[in-house]
Amino acid sequence: MTTWSAPIWLYLWLAGMAGGAYFAAFLAERFTGNGNGQLLRIATYLGAPLAVVGVILLVADLGNPIRFWHLLTVFKAVSPMSIGTWILLIWIGVAVVMAILWWAEASLSQEAGRGLRQITGALSWIGFVFAILVMAYTGVLLATSSQPLWTGTLLLPALFVASAVSTGVAMLIISGATGRTRLVPGKMVSRLAEADAILIVVELVVLVGYAIWLSASSTAGTSEALALLTSGALALPFWLGVVLLALLIPLGLEFASWGKKLETGGVWRTVITSSVFVILGGLILRAVIVIGGQI
């Protein structure tokens, strides 16, 4: 198989985080009564550039840009790379159109902007669907291969989806809770932090299930692939970068600040520190999985 280097796992990380942030913001604003769209705008304004950078990294890894443009001229329903490229580009396109409409709405009267808000509302649902596809695709791309660490289980895509939402929520927390003017109300940040704690637990459970599947699978090479992560060449980044940095330390920090007002003591710093660890850990997770599948 073609060697997938750093640009690929950076691409998977950025695309997943962008989709996860949009997914989380969309649901948060609809289930918490915060219908002003501020959180979704943050997710869109940050997510679209991250996804674009991911596409640029993908093009760079292909080596020959013509190979990438070929993916845009020919749609192959049986090609995960072709499907994923189109999913990502459609999501970026929807996000860019939404950002333009928001900008145009700010310069119009309330009555004139009502029509634009209806269009943006419809587009936000399309963006939501494609955000889910973007997150799932980053794991499906690997799971459809024949590599022992990647193939034959839905737990790998599930792991990537859980990580994508968790890192996306962490990005929303950092972007909304820092700076002189906090863009997101403290109550919303608290809810996001609590949601991320739950997501970390889900991710931890999926990771354990994935490890159990690797150890019990009859597929050739899976037990050796697991040993590579737990006791082999990738054991240090797996245990320190994934298990501790991405999961256990943030989980402990989140529970330490659970139910406390963000203005109390060092709760703000605790929540932001946890979010930084989650984002860095999400990057290490993808690096370990991508590298491990090629050894």
Image: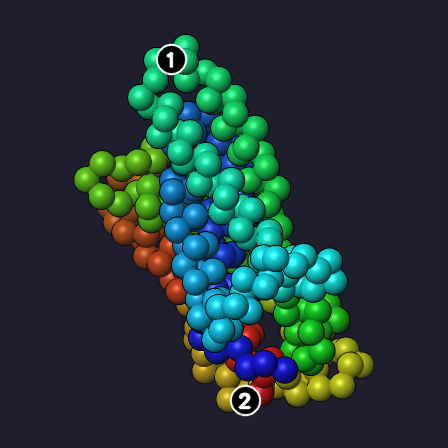
Q: Residues within 10 Å of mark 1 (few under 14, many from 20)?
A: few
The mark that comes first in sequence, 2 or 1, is 1
Q: Tag 2's secondary structure?
A: loop
Residue 295 on image: x %, y %: 58, 87
Q: Which residue is mark 1?
A: 110
Q: Amino acid at mark 1?
A: Gln
Q: Nearer the viewer, residue 119 or 203?
A: 119
Observer-side mark, 2 or 1, equals 1
The part of the image, by quadrant, that contains residue 289 is bottom right
Residue shown at 48%/17% (left/top)? 115
Q: Visible in this render: residue 191?
A: no
Q: Nearer the viewer, residue 272 or 68?
A: 68
Q: Residue at x 44, y 41 (%)?
A: 96
- Relative to 139, 26 lies left or right: left
Q: Position of residue 171 (x, y in %)?
A: 39, 50
Total tally of numbered discs in the picture: 2
Quadrant where the N terminus lies? bottom right
Q: Amino acid at mark 2?
A: Gly
Q: Is residue 26 above or below residue 202?
A: above
- Tell me: residue 143, above or below residue 235: above
Q: Which one is nearer the viewer's eye here, 90 or 249?
A: 90
Q: Which residue is mark 2?
A: 232
List the single residue furthest toward the left: 180
Judge whether residue 38 can be spotted in this image.
yes
Residue 229: quarter of image: bottom right
In the rendered view, tell whether residue 262 sits above or below residue 108: below
Q: Which mark is residue 18?
A: none
Q: Is residue 222 left or right of residue 295?
A: right
Residue in the image at 58% along x and 57% along y: 72
What residue appears at the point 47 percent right and 41 percent down from the top-left corner? 95
| Residue toward you, 57 or 144 | 57
Spatial separation of the CA atoms under disc 2 and disc 1: 61 Å
